[in-house]
Image: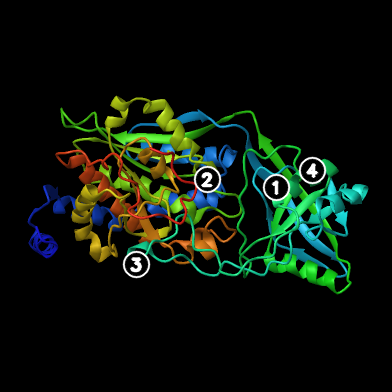
Amino acid sequence: MHRSILTFVVVIAVTFGMPALIAQDRVDLAMVARIRAEATQRSKVLETFNYITNVVGARPTGSRAHKQAADYVRGKLNEFGLANAHLEPFQFGRGWELEKFSLELTGPRYFPMSGYPLAWTPSVKGVLTGTPLYLADKSEAEITALGEKVRGAIVLASPIQTVFLLSDRQQPADTDQLVRIGGPEPPAERQATSVMPANAMNALLQRLGAGAILRPGSELHGTITVGGSPQTPKDSVPTVIVQAEHYNMLLRMMQTGVTPQLRLELRTAYQESDLNSYNVIAEIPGEDPVLRNEVVLVGAHLDSLPAATGATDNADGAASVVEAMRILKAVGAHPRRTIRVAIWSGEEVGFVGGRAYVEQHLADAASRDKIAVYLNNDPGAGATYGWYMANNADARGVFDAWLEPLKDLGLKRNVMDSNFTSEDGVFDGVGIPAFTTIMDYTNYDARTRHTNADFYEAVSERDLQQSAIVMAVFAYQSAMRDKTMPRRPAGVPASPRPATGRGRGAPPR
């Protein structure tokens, strides 16, 4: 059919309550209406979102906080009536948590400084006080020559921060241009760098026994992006990312000949009693005698980085997916295929939860063939605008039909590009049709993603409800269609055009 005819059929069906037959896919408008009513009139999504963000807070992989959140989600899925709600362990390694942190300017005046330690950074030995040592302008030989002056010192390891991330990426559903994967385009101007590369300087400072490293963030107005790696050695130099304006203040004081005095206290703890982390798994069993062994997998990640409460990355995605499953049970859905939910751990440290699931359950082609589709909810914040279709034209035709009756909720369109900065890339990498939501990027890149500003207030209840509706509708339609979701043909790349970057990317097919 011509697209205008498709749109006309959907509009007529919505208006008069008639089923619409579109490109061999029946859009169950009666079920869509029930899903929408349940999501808006009896929503529980804010309850889940509130607990994850405000009660639990930051959820680094392997931490006790992540386990607390996973236990809560498992309990809610069980409460909502899903089958076989359980935690699925996988070997991860040591967890990490922050016990105490303070950074203060104590002279020539007092000022509390804002910063956050990197995840998995070790504790500072005791309390460090004294004049910071600026080393960004020095070579390896010059730093080595300082010898004992470095031992125990608070090191300023970067130049003044002059280039800032000020804007978000374009909205992918609003442009035909390729949108950079994983984040916005970096500023055109170049930031001055240290004489030594950061990794080399870190290693040298570790050998010389430096007490701590301070580096500036790359955002303005108090926003600080904070990451961290579980591969950080226990004997590495403790590292803190400091608000750019505060870090720059120290260097500008020093440029005028004023000697600042600092006090730093930092206590962290490694969690080594349980070296597993946990995915949360539950399902609504399929009822079709032929199709019930096929699985529509719906997922979002629960782990977060340490600076705030991970509201937009990705408590909103996890809460919306949990709510979508609740809605399907509440409206009495009887899916032909099994709808399985996976709330992942370890997305922020290399998709390790999703990879573990593939290794544990999808090691051979026969098991992979039973996954009809994977639907992921992660990139962006709050409202859903469409789907990244990973260059799967046949699947896009199906998704376009399902999106049409939801456009009054703010959905816009599906795009052929891939994103692959989340678990969708893992599943696509083993040949499973895998798609992730296009969500709102307003204030996401420059303000909330991985930052100290990623709190509850960044997401509205209405957007959470809308996202839950989208996930429930697409999961249900995937479970009900006669045929499995079309696979992208072998040899066809995941994007219709060269990408400027693949973020953390997917394994190659």
Structural distance between the alpha carbons of marks 3 and 4:
47 Å
How crowded is the residue under tag 3: few (<14 C-alpha within 10 Å), some, or many (20+)?
few
How crowded is the residue under tag 2: few (<14 C-alpha within 10 Å), some, or many (20+)?
many
> In the figure, 54 relative to 161: above or below?
above
Residue at the spot 14% in from the left edge and 48% down from the top edge: 25
Horizontal side, residue 432 vs residue 104: left or right: left
Name the residue tied to disc 1: 199
Please tell me which of labels 3 and 4 falls first in the chain.
3
Structural distance between the alpha carbons of marks 1 and 3:
37 Å
Name the residue tied to disc 3: 175
Structural distance between the alpha carbons of marks 2 and 1:
20 Å
> In the figure, 319 relative to 296: above or below?
below
Horizontal side, residue 317 vs residue 185: left or right: left
Label 1 sits on a secondary structure element that is helix
Please tell me which of labels 4 and 2 falls first in the chain.
4
Please tell me which of labels 1 and 3 falls first in the chain.
3
Circle 2: residue type: Glu
For residue 410, which quarter of the picture? bottom left
Residue at the spot 76% in from the left edge and 52% down from the top edge: 213
Label 2 sits on a secondary structure element that is helix
Structural distance between the alpha carbons of marks 3 and 2:
27 Å
Please tell me which of labels 3 and 2 falls first in the chain.
3
How crowded is the residue under tag 4: few (<14 C-alpha within 10 Å), some, or many (20+)?
some
Label 4 sits on a secondary structure element that is helix
Name the residue tied to disc 2: 348
Q: Nearer the viewer, mark 4 or mark 2?
A: 4
All told, the count of numbered labels is 4
Task: State yes or no: discs 4 and 2 in contact (Cβ < 8 Å).
Answer: no
Horizontal side, residue 384 vs residue 397: left or right: right
Name the residue tied to disc 4: 206
